[in-house]
Image (cartoon, rainbow, N blue to C red):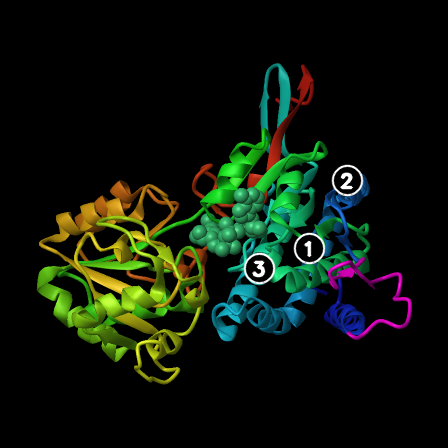
Amino acid sequence: MSASGFAPHQIRAIAEAIAREISAQSSPPPAGGSPAARPGPGGVALGGGAFATVDEAVGAARQAFFQFGGIGLEHRKRIIANLRAVLSAEADSLAREAWQETGLGRYQDKVHKNRLVIDKTPGPEELVPRAISGDRGLALIEPAPFGVIGAITPTTNPTSTIICNGIGMLSAGNTVAFNVHPRAKRVSVRTVQLMNQAIVAAGGPPNTVTCVAEPTIESAQALMTHRLVRLVVVTGGPGVVGEAMRSGKRAICGGPGNPPAVVDESADLDEAGRLIVEGHSFDNNIICVDEKEVIAVDRITDDLKAAMRRHGAYELPASELSRLEAVIFAKNAGPRGHAKVNRDLVGQNASVILDKLGIHVGPEVRAVLVEVPNDHPLIWTEQMMPVLPITRARNVDEAIDLAVAAEGGNFHTATMHSHDLPSLSKMARLSNCSIFVKNGTGVGGLGHHGEGYTSFTIASPTGEGLTTPLSFSRWRRCTVTDHFRIT
Ligand code: NAD
């Protein structure tokens, strides 16, 4: 028997039945459609949690909330366990569909992301109550759900964010209505439908997870301000974070980042070069925690660049910088400015970007390395493509100051490669990020090839950091006066 209370063969049978049903839904529906999934106005299947309007999606999640609240914690744990089992069986197919629909990133890295959130997103075990007893009785302080959460998800991690949010929010006893990114709506809707079926198969109510089948910016705004939505959770860039903060609701916001990687003289340079290329190019740099710029102490910069070249970076000569800018920026910026990137190249392979410069390389090239001055826009821009700028600092203190400035006050993620403890501590303190990784990759800070739980909503603007079920909980106190004190 597994921790879910289901025997392994039962979990497998449920997962297989759901996979069969989902694949039947992806086939052309019979004439007139089926009640389980019928084509919506834009061709995305309605049903199974997908609704035509925000009102319907929130209303159904609200109804599900009352039913979900009536089932016990042990049953909730079994539902979450089944959710993980069913999603695990579909992790590869969801990764492939996300890759095909968005055209961003690398398929294999998306598989890693799905598996990471399925395995390492914390569940109901997080909900540990506190009890205080004394002469005057007992106070029990326990986490409770908000109700319906309105969640907005990005195009860069469509399935992994929905899975991670879904597990975390439901574990805390909430239900959730999603407005997903319009450019990832098909795979996002399928993820929601799959989750609903796994929940129902484990005895939970329908529509604990819902979504708007044809999402738009307007429907996102309507969701954030809907009267039945108790908590808003957004994951995206500065636009959606600003909207959430103006919504008038309690908001948890995962916003943009520009993670620096600092390297000093004490680092193991070969290992630093390998890890930076690996972390920077993970899913072609579209993850918010991926290394976006390298700041190296002058004395070791040449050796570090050589290590990066050995580990999959193609170094572009400085003479090619202006041609590169013309290709990757839609609008350049002045010193220390934020350039507007060419959206067509976001999340593309390094070989595609080099191709535009007439340089033809194979898929083994993971990143385009280019040395730039300190104030070059590439250092200051969240480029989200495998173009890795490196710049020099005279010493480690100067490198740390520059890295903190380039991080831009997002307080999101920073990394450093060093074996000098005072310098590592200084960087950790001054960068003050939700995630600081020493001698590892940015994505290692999410628990990928690293320790700790994961989250794909890293809420730096609102302070929750890596969100967990506790982030989606209210604290409620129940007091008994003058009783229950044993001694
Ligand atoms: P995006 O901001 O374009 O879109 C994110 C979501 O917000 C989408 O569903 C979109 O439809 C919606 N949206 C955008 N502007 C809106 C507005 N004005 N009103 C209402 N809704 C709006 O971002 P993206 O390209 O999908 O994702 C990349 C960005 O997200 C990067 O900046 C990245 O750093 C950030 N991100 C942050 C985290 C985190 O956990 N902190 C995780 C993933 C991505």
Question: Height in image: 465 above or below 181?
Answer: above
Tell which tag, 3 or 1, sits nearer the viewer. 3
> Number of marks in the image?
3
Is-magenta flag for residue 30? Answer: yes
Which is more toward the observer, 147 or 103?
103
Mark 1 Cα-neighbour bin, 10 Å: few <14, some 14–19, many ≥20 = many
Query: Helix, strand, or loop for circle 2?
Result: helix
Query: Helix, strand, or loop for circle 3?
Result: helix
Query: Helix, strand, or loop for circle 1?
Result: helix
Left or right: residue 323 compared with residue 114: left
Of the numbered discs 1 and 2, the one sitting upstream in the chain is 2
Residue at image coords 71%, 51%: 212
Of the numbered discs 2 and 3, the one sitting upstream in the chain is 2
Left or right: residue 9 compared with residue 466: right
**What range of the chain is rendered magenta?**
27-47
Q: Which mark is residue 80?
A: 1
User: Marks 1 and 2, Cα distance to the nearest angstrom?
Assistant: 19 Å
Q: Position of residue 16 (x, y in %)?
A: 76, 73
Q: Amino acid at mark 1?
A: Ile
Q: Position of residue 145 (x, y in %)?
A: 67, 37
Q: Which residue, given by chain and number where applicable, does mark 2 sit on?
A: 62
Q: Which residue, given by chain and number where applicable, does mark 3 sit on?
A: 158
Image quadrant where residue 192 sits:
bottom right
Of the numbered discs 3 and 1, the one sitting upstream in the chain is 1
User: Marks 3 and 1, Cα distance to the nearest angstrom?
Assistant: 20 Å
Residue at image coords 24%, 79%: 310
Tag 3–tag 1 contact (CB < 8 Å): no
Residue at image coords 72%, 65%: 1
